[in-house]
Amino acid sequence: VFTGDRMGIGSAGNKDEGQTLERYVFKDPATMEGVMPWVKFMQATIRRRPFLVQALEGVMEKLIRQLNFYSTEEKEKLALGTALVYVHNLGPLALPIFRALLDDAKVQDGTALHFLTQFFKAYLDNAPMDDLVQLLRRAKSEDNLLEYFPYNKRTEEQFAKHFEGEGLSELVEHSKKRFADARLKEIKKKTKEAIAAGSSLQEVQDIINQSTAEEEVPEVRLIDTIWNSVMEGGDWDTKNQQQAHLNALKHIKAWHKLLAAFATSAKIELALLNSIQVYCYTDAKMLKLFPQIVKMVYDVDVIDEDTIMFWHRKGSSPKGRQQFLSLIHISEPTRLGM
């Protein structure tokens, strides 16, 4: 179906027998009209003989491993056909197909990236971005798309430039979040390690600044990462709840200047307050401590009163909103009561 090979091997005594095709994917136009009939043919065949799914997967993997032997037009037809196979859920596993692209030769000469680009364009012409994301997750490729780029082009800037140029802005936007997720995960790891090692406030702040110097991360997500890094670096695993609360408050006070260094606007302060809310919501032992934490970060000028009032009016997280609002009472515009 793809290359015009025999449809069968014929009888045992004559392996040259068997039907061959005058038309096939590589011979027909590299268009939806040219490739779709073959995808429908494979779909109908698999419905009658489901065991052929494994054969289709094997053939697709083999063809992709041999990509360098095909012309540019044939590669594009194969990318279109492969995309439509997944759009129409014919059944092959995605992992072997994406893995077949990841060999040094195809990556370095750009073959892998060209094929993947044509695949993405064909897929998104026929299915939504959410479906592509699910496919990438099944292929274990959502977080390693840079590996399909030549070694000297594995940067977020090159990623965005390439796919924006190919009209794949949806993919770029989605990947920005994934790149940020990876950076924030690394920042959290380094911050926790530094706190556990007894590093100074300035040393921890320098680690965070260095980690965000080359590639920016959303400020509201960064403050959430810093808050959780600080809290996970503390030690209040004790059966005495009162002592646990005292230890937690002492730990927050010790690191409040780190929070203040990055909570530099009302928007970030609100994000921090919601991070505190979510943290206390997910840890039942900290629930009743919420007002005291808020009062502490207010007293040491990490979070402004106006931010707390806005949070109370309409800025709080939906997670346990009413329960937390009932813990903090705003009596007058200029007075904060807790």
Image: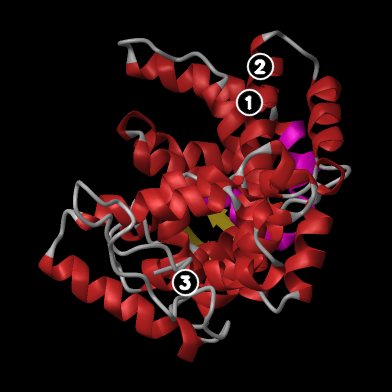
Please tell me which of labels 3 and 1 falls first in the chain.
Answer: 3
Residue 160 picture location, percent across and down: 77, 63
Q: How crowded is the residue under tag 2: few (<14 C-alpha within 10 Å), some, or many (20+)? A: some
Query: SS class of the residue under badge 2?
Result: helix
Residue located beneath label 3 in the image: 81
Residue at point 62%, 66% (across, down): 75
Q: Is residue 280 above or below residue 53?
A: above
Which residue lies most toward the front here?
Answer: 13
Query: Residue sitting at 43 percent across and 80 percent down?
Result: 22
In the figure, is residue 144 to the left or right of 287? right
From the image, tell me which residue sits under label 1.
Answer: 189
In what quadrant of the picture does the N terminus appear? bottom left
Position above or below: 107 against 198: below
For the stretch drawn in magenta, the main secondary structure is helix
> What amino acid does circle 3 point to?
Gly
Q: Give the vertical position of 240 relative to 38 (above or below).
A: above
Magenta segment: 257-275
Give the CA separation, mark 2 to mark 1.
Answer: 6 Å
Distance (Cα) linking label 3 and label 2: 48 Å
Q: Is residue 221 magenta?
A: no
| Image quadrant in which you'd find residue 2 | bottom left
Element marked by disc 3: helix
Q: Residue at x 69, y 24 (%)?
A: 190
Place of residue 40 in the rendered image (x, y in percent of width and height, measured from the top left): 30, 80
Residue 259 part of the magenta-drawn span: yes
Read off the residue under disc 2.
193
